[in-house]
Amino acid sequence: MKGGTKLDKIYLDNAATTKMSEAAIKEMTRCMNDYYGNPSSLYTVGQQAKEIIEKAREEIAGVINASPKEIYFTSGGSEADNQAIITAAAIGKRKGKMHIVTSAIEHHAVLHALRRLKNEGFEITELPVSKEGIVNKEDVKKAIRDDTCLVTVMYANNEIGTLQPVSEIGAICKEKGVLFHTDAVQAVGHVPIDVKAENIDMLSASAHKFHGPKGIGFLYVRKGIIVSNLIEGGAQERGKRAGTENVPAISAMAVALKEAEAGMKENAKKLTALRDYLIKGLSGIPHSALNGDAKKRLPSNVNFCFEGIEGESLLLLLDDKGICASSGSACTSGSLDPSHVLLAIGRVHDVAHGSLRLSLSEETTKEELDAAIKAVKETVEYLRGFSPVWRDLNAGKLQFIL
Ligand SMILES: *Cc1c(COP(=O)(O)O)cnc(C)c1O
């Protein structure tokens, strides 16, 4: 089903990005060849390109039960998050409402956009999560004030995969008359989403997380909300996002999303079984623990902490064995701070450092997972063999936590 070059690798980092599907690659190529016109041009070649993007808009809207006019194409999830937050902030500011509610486990695209607003005088309430990594809807209710202009809570976490009570939060926000944005980048194409039934006002998505191309995504904004634009210029995207549209990427995103929707039920069932098999296999490693709720998580996500080791070393040694994994999120690696998500679920610094995320795709096989379990077991043991922390733990100088 999926295209691209078959690498001799076990790719278990689908939360970082996915391989493009064959159909999406084909669609992208078709558009590059046949629909090279500028969608803003009035002659037929331009209007044909325009038709391609409007068809894509319609298809994408259909998947989340939105109307096409509520879909704005962006360069990806980060841009969509920023645009949603800037939009809510501008509306809030006009009404003198400068308080925003979010969670401690958001993606940096949300957290850093909010950090900027804080410098501009907004007040941000960052809600804690349970040790299972889930926001409490009662906390959301209590945090909303008369001057709250936005609640932004992600649909599914990118590191530990936990699914948040989105429809409950949506209902609370609707009742209180507060805008609700959800970063659904990890969820779109993987779990069913209905923006109307779930009372979602704004939603961010990114194609490369569902086997579409990189550098393209969309923002859903409920009708009636005045969108602020991040990029000034031409009248594209109803004047809200200037710049000539990326026709091939937009169309390929729609193809990938339709494909993901068609296979969603079957894939979720298959992946859940594989995920639980992997969790069971890794649980056999002593002094380890699963991060995030065992069931209320994406069918594709497994995240563990192993005491006495460094996640980064584990990653590099797994790479030598042909296994692509992640320690925390790709954006965090390269920094020495442990993941804010793992700290938020109560992991202490040392334990949080020894984390590993394995994220599966529809292409993942049981054989690959068997190889991964074996490799992780061996590598953790090997690293513990010369870890001073592990030695101190075993000598009783430090106390085991896991
Ligand atoms: C990947 C991701 C993003 C960023 O999306 P890009 O398209 O890479 O900008 C934002 N939020 C979450 C939850 C993600 O997983």
Image (cartoon, helix red, strand yellow):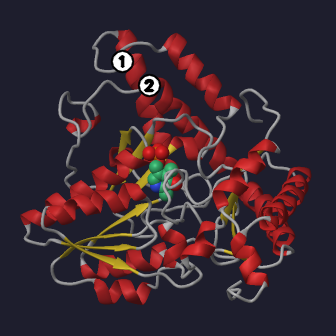
Q: Looking at numbered disc 2 in the image, what kind of residue is underneath it? A: Val
Q: Amino acid at mark 1?
A: Gln
In-image side of 136 versus 318 (left or right)? left
Mark 2 lies on a secondary structure that is helix
| Disc 1: residue Cβ within 8 A of ligand 1's nearest atom | no
Image location of residue 309, percent across then percent down: 70, 67
* Label pair 1/2, CB-CB below 8 angstroms: no
| Quarter of image, res 277 | bottom right
Q: Nearer the viewer, residue 365 or 202?
A: 365
The image shows a total of numbered marks equal to 2
Circle 2 packing at 10 Å, graded few (<14), some (14-19), many (20+), is: many
Neighbours of disc 1 within 10 Å: few (<14), some (14-19), many (20+): some
Q: Nearer the viewer, residue 271 or 347?
A: 347
Between discs 1 and 2, the one toward the N terminus? 1
What residue sits 10% from the left and 64% below the top? Answer: 93
Residue 360 vertical placement versus 344 (above, below): above
Q: Which residue is mark 2?
A: 247
| Residue drawn 78% across the image and 85% down it | 395
The picture places residue 290, in percent across and down from the top left corner, at 70, 75
- For residue 231, what is the image quadrant? top left
The answer to whether any part of residue 359 appears in the image is: no
Split into 4 quadrants, where in the image is the N terminus? top right
**Image position, residue 253 (x, y; %):** 53, 37
Please report the residue visible at 67 percent of the width from the left and 30 percent of the height from the top. 23
Relative to residue 348, is residue 102 drawn left or right? left
Q: Disc 1 designates what residue?
A: 47
Residue 53 visible in the current orientation: yes
